[in-house]
Image (cartoon, coloured by chain):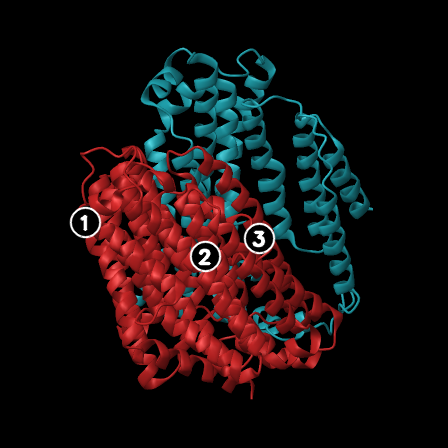
Chain colours: A red, B cyan
Amino acid sequence: MTAHFPILQVIIPLFAAPLCLFLRIPRLVGVFAIFVSAAAFLISYGLLQEVITHGTISYKLGGWPAPWGIEYRIDTLNSFLLLLVSGVSTVVLLASLSSISRELPQNRHTYFYTAYLLCLTGLLGILATADAFNVFVFLEISSLSSYTIIAIGTDRRALAASYQYLIMGTIGATFILIGVGLMYMMTGTLNMYDLAERLPAVYKSKTVLSAFGFFIVGVCLKLALFPLHLWLPNAYAYAPSITTAFLAATSTKVAVYVLIRYIFSVFGIEFVDMSLPLGDIFLILGLVGIFVASISATFQLNIKRLFAYSSVAQIGYIILGLAIETQLGITATLLHLFNHALMKAALFLAIGAVFYRIGSAQLNHYAGLGKKMPLTMAAIVAGGLSLIGVPLTVGFVSKWYLVVALLDKGWWPVAVLVLLSSLIAVIYVWRVVEWVYFTPPRIITEEVKEAPLSQLIPIWMLVLANIYFGVDTRLTVGVSKLAAQSLFGVNL
Amino acid sequence: MLLSFLALTAIAITRMGDLFAVVMLSGIYSLLSASLFLDLDAVDVAFTEASVGAGISTLLFLATLKLVPRYEKKSRYKPALALGVVIVTGALLIYGTLDMPHFGDADAPVHQHVAPRYLNDSINEVGLPNVVTSVLASYRGYDTLGEVVVVFAAGIGVMSLLMVSQRTKARALTKVPADMQHQIILRIVAKMMLPLILIFALYVQFHGDYGPGGGFQAGVIFAAGIILYTMLFGLSLTQSVIKPVFVEMLTAFGVLLYSGVGIVCMILGGNYLDYDVLSHDPVHGQHLGILLIELGVGITVAAVMITLFFKFTWRTVKHKYNQ
């Protein structure tokens, strides 16, 4: 049974999604989805343990050996992210039962959970596979279903946002497909590790260079790297709360994984350095992105938009770690991937809980909520502190590693800029705190109560995870270091 | 020659304001691409392009056109930035072609690395004369499962976004005449054609192992037959044969069948989608597995297409009669 673990964690949600259409009873479908996601989580935990003790696992789909058939290959890097995605998905689903019944008409619940499970399937499939074309197929599954779960709510503006995302996402996917096609043309193979062996022979060709260019631009569209982030704020702001929490925590992270995987395991860092000044491009775009997005965040009136812009800024930090191109830099990137997912999932779930009670995500409606919903508000503050990077939270750990990596490289001006940018985070988090605790209540009435337990529990699970992984960094730092080592090991 | 026609059609599509003409031209565009694929000896791809691009998507576009005005709104917006991006992309694509292997070059990497095994050994390993089907359904069967799930995901998207009330559905059953009620010649010809179309779909479905064809094409052709019937004879008649809820469940059933075959393979001791274990003789197992998964593909594709059309038709009913 354990031999099938690499495929099982993708197949379980894949098989469960169509089953939802047969269950059809909204509540039942929700509970079913929780169990499915939890099963995927347990399997990915088993996989991580297995990889740490026994090393990389390879699984031949259809029993065909690698370049002819499709291979799944689980190593430290992707088992770490598999754990993250399936874990966050499970916790978010716990909160979904009450949140979805408030935000969606009842006849859409089944479709929502079907699309949600499909999206989970897609993300897990992208992470597990070692086949360049298979990445594209699962990317399409996750993209199409995320357009659905964004647009499915009652907010009409979500339709336009989802459409915008669809156009940008399709362009991104097409570019990725062109990249994969050109690579296949030059090497005759689609398996990533086989590609890595066969690409060096054709490094000099213009076709491979343009394949690389198309691929990078396509993935950067998907991960919303500044200035390709325009689809993100609206999509996050108008989607149902559960969707926002899930996508903000997972979907851009998976795109970053694809970027790392291709740069290090397929093209190889020497080729990247030889052909394009990618490090410099990422450095500049990352820094500009951090500042522009953080400053935009301070002007937002809608709290979901505010944190959506903050997400764009956090992607800047993640890309910055990548731009350093050292083991320390990659470690910082991976840490921030994991940690940012925890923060944003907690924050957006807490915002969803507020929406559950007051039906709004406008910042001025938050006035006076500090007294009415103390536990939810405390969670938002904790998430905000983590976003700034206050010690004892996960945000501190990853910023620390990022600054250390920057100093190690000798880029101290960049390190100073990173610290400065944290001050902007202080400003936008403070704006929220000010509305919540120091403004007299305006429109909220007496009936507003603390969020229901079904939402408080998942929110606080994530908040505690934020604090736990901020103190006990053995798992996250250990695994990130191992993964970074193996990425560089492959190319030495 | 074909390529220049293709380019001309594409330019015409972007310049045209009449959406009806645009739909017709995009149908022509697909047909031209299909001929181009045929010229490149990619018969299966050409078949898919012809049935999907020129066939069903034109029909769905037409169904959408009933909901929106026929002419494009004039906009003063001149997107210079977009033009710049397009030019850069095009330039990069052309730059990429400079070092490509020559067209038809037998020494090109694609013909040297994985392809020889597909061409030489698939007849013994999988046992099908059509190599394309062997690759698509067995060697890379998992990708095909992914594609079916993509179709299903798109179906779920439309189903969840175009919800219609029971009232509209009930009205669609009673008063609404078919769009082309008075086209007598069309109705008679269609009645004669329909059984042939459906039988042809089944032929394509089950003959995919031996010649061009398979689940995707068959599903689309089958759906096109049903859609043609609905357009000419009205939703109420169609629904007395096919219940919409039933079709919706079929979209899920195809995916379940496909991934279920994979799970059975696992239970019988093979890897996921390793059809060898399905029968005591591996080649028989491969045959059985491919037959079943192609059926799953066909069911999901046909059901999703029919559901999409139903949804659009209900919308039209809602706009026309529910004031």
Earlier sequence position, callout 1 versus callout 2: 2
Residue under mark 3: which chain is it in?
B
Residue drawn at x 44%, y 37% is B158
Dividing the picture into quadrants, the one containing residue B182 is: top right
Location of mark 3 (residue): B211
Location of mark 1 (residue): A454
Would you say residue B98 is visible in this rendering?
yes
Residue under mark 2: which chain is it in?
A
Alpha-carbon span between mark 3 and mark 1: 56 Å
Do marks 1 and 2 both belong to one polypeptide chain?
Answer: yes
* Residue A362, position as x, y percentages in the image: 38, 39
Q: Secondary structure at mark 2?
A: helix
- Residue A311 numbered tag: 2
Q: Secondary structure at mark 3?
A: loop
- Residue B66 numbered tag: none
Do marks 3 and 1 both belong to one polypeptide chain?
Answer: no
User: Mark 2: which amino acid?
Assistant: Ser
* Residue B165, position as x, y percentages in the image: 34, 23
Residue drawn at x 27%, y 74% is A46
